[in-house]
Image (cartoon, rainbow, N blue to C red):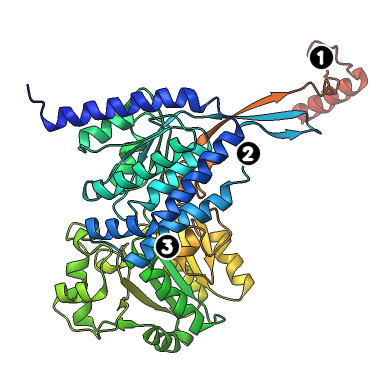
Amino acid sequence: MELDRDLCSLQEVRNLVRAARKAQETLMNFTQEQVDKIIDMMREAGEANAARLAMMAVSETGMGNYNDKCFKNYFASRTLYDYIKPMKTVGIIREDHDKKLWEIAEPVGVIAGIIPTTNPTSTVIYKAMIALKARNAIVFSPHPSAVRCTNEAAKIMHQAAVAAGAPEGAIGCIMNLSMGATNELMKHPSVAMILATGGSALVKAAYSSGKPALGVGPGNVPAFVERSADLAKAAEYIIMGKTFDNGTICASEQAIVAEECIADDLITHLKRQGAHFLDPEEVVKVSKVVMLANGGVNPKVVGKEPKFIAQLAGINIPDQTKCLIAPLSGVGPQWPLSYEKLTTVLGFYRVADWHEGCDRCFQILEAGGVGHSLSMHCNNVEIIREFALKKPVNRLLINTPAAMGGVGATTGLAPSFTLGCGTWAGSSVSENVTPLHLLNIKRVAWHLGIPDRKPVQSQNQTVQVDAQLVQEIIKQIMQQLKA
């Protein structure tokens, strides 16, 4: 009897989770040395296959570009490895001699890893490495448009891990993908946690599964350029960040907010970096092809070059254009390009001063990026402090390309492809996710002594009354009544 596709996909998930749970029982007894050997082998495999996986991802999804996807895969392998290598994730990981405390790391268990189409191979490398560093098995659910390259990345990571001593089944990936299969994975009794990277609906489903979940919110990152900024460098970094892998990183810049006094000079520098400014008629045409009528970005343009978008919109642009910039005067449905655009299109706003710039950035964030990130090009520390204290974001990125700064490539943030957005965006974590988020921490606490107790007056204690004072009060009251 032939089973239909949905039943096959459900059975595949159950088989993968069963194998992962069996592997988990072995992994949890590994030493730190065994774990670190596995991670090193996975790092080597990720580096060795970075170019091939990048080519597969671009070919299958049609998003981004080969060079930047190579960098993403290398970043998820080497840069991540260098960051997590010294982490203690086995046994006693911290001792506080003063407070007489031990902290002991335990794996959380089998993890469900949800993978986006925008970063279909680098996210697999990253999640597989942080999962096994914390002694967790992981099963991946690919995006429907990236099943082949995501499975290949998972296969490479699994083979490398097993060659270094990891048990079979420690890393799995769904081949017969369906929505039912993804839901089955997230709700499976043997899955302990969900690492969700993808669209808002999928992340919401992860949080609704009844399992602990680490998810991310959308990014609608404003790039505020203040008058003290190095304008040439600001323009270079904004275009670099926005065009990195054709805008597929959620931390990439979505709109420039420039002070009026430097706006024209900034535009000159942006044009030198390959930006093409749209006229009002072109803004309308580009808006119609980039954004959907009911909201959200058009999947057809995600991760595409400006030339593709221009042809779709029926406009002419210079051959060397790297990015399309749309001058806007407001935020909201009337200005569709004020929302997140995971492609090579930026909004552009003029503001009178940094106070108005602060307000405009807040409007942009409220339109769909609250909790995520904000970019600033500024050398005035006092203004940076004002933004840091008042803006509802968990990453304020200063004088750096936002796309690379947000994931920790050009900043001191933890290298990560899961950027927590905190409770502002309905996320359970507010920082870049690392292996330390995939651990249960046990604590052993010693007796420090009995705290001193202050004497407490008993409620039944007899209160001494001054009889003479009482008589004087009665006398005064009687005189008042007679009067």
Q: Is 374 on the left or on the right of 305, as rendered? A: right
Residue type at mark 1? Ser
Report the residue marked by disc 1: 458
Mark 3 or mark 2: name the one nearer the start of the chain.
3
Q: Where is residue 238 in the image (x, y as percent from the top left)?
A: 43, 74
Q: Is 380 on the left or on the right of 278, as rendered? A: right
Quadrant occupied by the N terminus: top left
Other-residue count near label 2 (Cα within 10 Å), few / some / many at <14 / 14–19 / ≥20: some
The structure residue drawn at horizontal position 33% and vertical position 72%, both measured from the top left corner, is 346
Quadrant occupied by the C terminus: top right
Name the image quarter holding residue 318: bottom left
Residue type at mark 3? Phe
Report the residue marked by disc 2: 88
Residue type at mark 2? Lys
The structure residue drawn at horizontal position 78% and vertical position 30%, both measured from the top left corner, is 480
The structure residue drawn at horizontal position 17% and vertical position 81%, both measured from the top left corner, is 315
Q: Which mark is residue 55?
A: none
Report the residue marked by disc 3: 71
Q: Nearer the viewer, residue 292 or 8?
A: 8
